[in-house]
């Protein structure tokens, strides 16, 4: 019955309650949608980092990160490869050589990391091959006129690595291509140190240009065939600096890592969180920030709610006096006011969460195009199209936070009500 | 056999909130028996409201005792006192003071809900009481849809719902026209006669005084006269 009275009481001052509910709803929509944008950005960045850049796990020589020496290849690469392929949780594995080089075009040069890969195996681990684009496709996408398309088609052979070519192939990032002023078919020269410490060089022809959201990665990572790189560096056949592992499922990261560490104690096994600590930190920090945003919003709303409930108590002095006179005890008066505050806040909150969920659902599919500002975003590895998303658990937590806020906001007004003396309250004329 | 249900022993009430001490109630002794229909009469400032508040356990005497059904209510802890009021005293207020969001039936049920009575009993008693006060047709109306007289009749039904020892009515007719006043008084008289319910009014209203079977005159915090009237 107290519940029913509290609920009905809310609608006594309909306009005022609707205003409070609207405030709570707007606060929730703003807070949750903002959180979803941040979360979407962070998740997308993580997803892309795993997909294109780091994969889930990597194995290196135990000293590799101290000094990325060309001779720190993983001991017993083949044995490790064979063993981890047997894990059912592991989707695919690729081994790579990684050598820092100077890369030069006819116009300029820069330092990059040359990654020697086995193109077919690499496909199972990272998706750079999907990000390699053909100028002709781009032209079509951009709706360029037909003649120019033809020209593009003639010019471009932008593909992932091809079989049986006489020349050495290289796939570079779009940013690097711009910097070096090279295009598909252009030749680039790389200078590097061999395993014996000698300087050597190799000529590669650009066969593909990839475009991902992380322009820093585009700028610094160039892919070549592992065989070509091995030949240049003079490393043994089958040597690898890095084994990249892609899992079936993100959730298996921790248990698998534990297993691998136990099984291969001589090598370093690292997860993407350790390999890109800023990414791991961002994900965790983001989760904290989302709640910080919500708590700040709720705090502000809380004061508004306190104010409203004080008005409610003041308006009902006489009624409260009557209730206490006829036998409503302090606990019941307190809980009635608290319940009324919770119902008021939660109604607004649920409406807000509902609208926020619809918005997130819509924009989560359609995306929010920020290409106007995208240069800045891509420079730090974020996609220019935002897909807001937020987990169901977030809504549960928010619901609990709203209830907590309402409880806190109701304490002062409820205490005010309890201080009333029924004999006096009954005589007050409002 | 007559039973003493309310015994007021040498009650004083002194207010010291202002610089001047106010002796609002100055040594009142009164006894009420079951089935009385009594009016406490007196001008404003006579102390009758203070007296009524102390009888109702809404205020504590500075000295003296208020004994209801052999319990000295001055000795009850505040939380016990609330429960005591709920179970032993029915209140009717000048301004009706119904819960505006509840229907007549729910208003009457409310106190039984506080008492923890089962739903079935609450329903039956609320219906019966509202029929007693002549509102059998309006049990699902909210107070705002009822006239002042009808609201006050709901208030009487509510006061009786908890099965109290007596009903304390503070100027119950002050806001009513003469026709409503008459109806209300007739109903209360009938409840008094048929159910043996004790009513104690505070009032200015000559119409109430006329119906009362005992009239207590209070002036300057003291009982000036206390007369039983034969009807």
Image: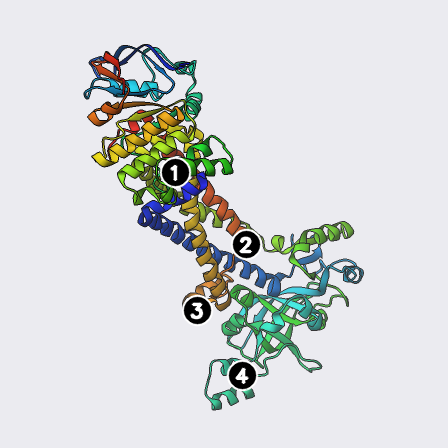
Residue lying farthest front? Answer: B231
Discs 1, 3 touching: Cβ within 8 Å: no
**Residue under circle 1?**
B131
Query: Pointer 4: residues within 10 angstroms few (<14), some, or many (20+)?
Result: many
Query: Pointer 1: residues within 10 angstroms few (<14), some, or many (20+)?
Result: some
**Residue under circle 2?**
A392
Q: Does residue B136 appear anywhere in the picture?
A: yes
- Between marks 1 and 2, how big is the CA–CA gap? 53 Å
Residue B94 in picture, x, y percent from top left: 27, 30
**Residue under circle 3?**
A371
Q: Residue A136 bears which disc, if any?
A: 4
Residue lying farthest bottom? Answer: A147
Q: Quadrant of residue B13?
A: top left
- Between marks 3 and 4, how big is the CA–CA gap? 22 Å
Discs 3, 4 touching: Cβ within 8 Å: no
Residue at 42% from the left image edge and 36% from the top image edge: B128
- Sequence-first tag of 3 and 4: 4
Viewer-side label of 4, 1: 1
Confirm whether circles 1 and 3 share one chain: no
Residue B102 in picture, x, y percent from top left: 38, 41
Discs 4, 2 touching: Cβ within 8 Å: no
């Amino acid at each position: 019955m107290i519940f029913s009275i509290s609920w009905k009481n809310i609608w006594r001052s309909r306009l005022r309650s609707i205003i409070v509910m609207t405030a709570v709803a707007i606060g929730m929509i703003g807070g949750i949608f903002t959180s979803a944008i941040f979360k979407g950005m962070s998740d997308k960045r993580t997803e892309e980092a795993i997909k294109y850049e780091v994969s889930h796990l990597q194995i290196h020589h135990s000293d590799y990160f101290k000094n990325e020496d060309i001779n720190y290849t993983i001991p017993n690469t083949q044995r490790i490869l064979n063993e981890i392929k047997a894990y059912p949780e592991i989707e695919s594995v690729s081994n790579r050589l990684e050598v820092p080089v100077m890369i030069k075009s006819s116009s300029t040069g820069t330092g990059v990391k040359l990654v020697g890969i086995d193109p077919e195996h690499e496909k199972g681990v990272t998706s750079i091959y999907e990000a390699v684009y053909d100028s002709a496709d781009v032209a079509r996408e951009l709706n360029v006129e037909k003649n120019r398309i033809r020209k593009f088609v003639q010019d471009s052979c932008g593909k992932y690595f091809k079989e049986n070519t006489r020349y050495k192939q290289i796939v570079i990032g779009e940013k690097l291509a711009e910097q070096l002023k090279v295009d598909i078919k252009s030749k680039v020269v790389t200078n590097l140190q061999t395993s014996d410490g000698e300087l050597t060089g190799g000529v590669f022809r650009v066969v593909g240009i990839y475009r991902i959201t992380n322009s820093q990665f585009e700028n610094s990572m160039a892919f070549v065939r592992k065989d070509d790189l091995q030949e240049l560096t003079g490393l043994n056949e089958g040597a690898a600096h890095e084994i990249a592992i892609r899992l079936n499922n993100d959730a298996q990261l921790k248990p698998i890592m534990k297993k691998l560490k136990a099984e291969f104690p001589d090598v370093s096994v690292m997860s993407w969180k350790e390999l890109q600590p800023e990414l791991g930190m961002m994900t965790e920090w983001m989760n904290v920030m989302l709640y910080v945003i919500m708590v700040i919003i709720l705090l502000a709303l809380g004061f508004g709610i306190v104010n409203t409930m004080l008005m409610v108590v003041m308006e009902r002095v006489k009624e409260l006096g009557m209730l206490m006179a006829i036998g409503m005890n302090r606990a019941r008066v307190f809980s009635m006011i608290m319940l009324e505050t919770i119902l008021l806040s939660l109604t607004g909150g649920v409406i807000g969460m509902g609208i926020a969920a619809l918005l997130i659902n819509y924009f989560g599919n359609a995306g929010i195009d920020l290409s106007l500002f995208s240069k800045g975003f891509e420079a730090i590895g974020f996609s220019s199209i935002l897909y807001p998303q937020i987990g169901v658990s977030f809504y549960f937590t928010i619901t609990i936070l709203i209830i907590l806020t309402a409880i806190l906001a109701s304490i002062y007004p409820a205490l005010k009500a309890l201080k009333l003396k029924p004999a006096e309250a009954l005589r007050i004329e409002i | 056999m007559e039973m003493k249900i309310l015994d007021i022993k040498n009650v004083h009430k002194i207010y010291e909130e202002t610089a001047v001490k106010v002796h609002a109630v100055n040594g009142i002794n009164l006894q009420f028996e079951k089935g009385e229909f009594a009016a406490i009469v007196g001008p404003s400032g006579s102390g009758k409201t203070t007296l009524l508040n102390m009888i109702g356990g809404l205020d504590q005497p500075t000295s003296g005792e208020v004994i209801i059904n052999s319990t000295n209510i001055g000795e009850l802890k505040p939380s016990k006192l609330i429960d005591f009021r709920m179970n032993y005293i029915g209140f009717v207020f000048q301004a009706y003071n119904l819960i505006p969001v509840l229907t007549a039936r729910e208003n009457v049920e409310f106190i039984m809900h506080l008492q923890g009575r089962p739903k079935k009993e609450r329903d039956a008693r609320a219906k019966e009481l509202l029929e007693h006060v002549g509102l059998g047709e309006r049990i699902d109306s909210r107070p705002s849809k009822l006239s002042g007289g009808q609201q006050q009749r709901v208030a009487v039904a509510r006061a009786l719902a908890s099965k109290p020892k007596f009903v304390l009515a503070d100027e119950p007719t002050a806001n009513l026209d003469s026709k409503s006043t008459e109806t209300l008084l007739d109903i209360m008289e009938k409840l008094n006669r048929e159910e043996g319910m004790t009513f104690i009014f505070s009032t200015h209203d000559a119409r109430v005084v006329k119906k009362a079977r005992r009239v207590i005159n209070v002036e300057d915090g003291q009982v000036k006269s206390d007369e039983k009237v034969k009807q």
